[in-house]
Image (tube, rainbow, N blue to C red):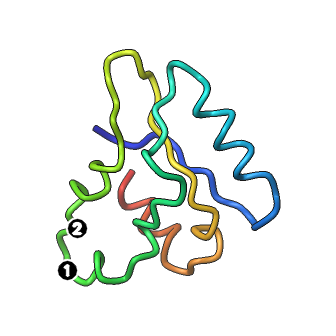
Amino acid sequence: MKVDFLVCGAQKSGTTTLDAYLREHPEICMSSQKEVHFFDTEERFQNDRVDYSQYHAAFSSDSSHKRIGESTPIYMYWHEAPKRIWQYN
């Protein structure tokens, strides 16, 4: 399992609305909650081996889903988040 996309952005810029629209699509699995905050939690990245099972537990994907995504707007502002997301993918 791999998360295909993330919605990042400024507060009050439509990320909540975009998240809601994506949740309506039958072929997209969004995280069980908006704003997972995985890539901006420093404790998860203190070791060389990151446990992504904690991240993947936020999703309930099945065979009807073609894409998996999540919305955490603050990733755009969290200095280390883009690097961590790049390393994940």
Along the line of sight, which residue is nearer the eye, 61 or 42? 61
**Residue 73 in the image: x percent, y percent?**
64, 63
Whether pointer 2 and pointer 1 mark residues with C-beta atoms closer than 8 Å, the reply is yes
Q: Position of residue 62 (x, y in %)?
A: 32, 23
Amino acid type of disc 1?
Asn
Q: Is residue 24 above or below residue 83?
A: above
> Which picture quadrant has residue 77?
bottom right
Classify residue 26 as left or right of residue 21: left
Q: Residue at x 70, y 51 (%)?
A: 16
Could you say whether the residue bearing mark 2 is in a helix, strand or loop? loop
Circle 2: residue type:
Val
Tag 1 residue: 47
Residue that carries the numbered disc 2 in the rendered image: 50
Query: How many numbered marks appear?
Result: 2
On the image, the x and y values in percent for residue 69 come to: 49, 42
Task: Indicate left or right for 9 with 43 as reference.
Answer: right
Which corner quadrant of the image does residue 23 belong to?
top right
Crowding around mark 2 (Cα neighbors within 10 Å: few <14, some 14 to 19, many 20+) is some
Which quadrant, please, contains the N terminus? top left
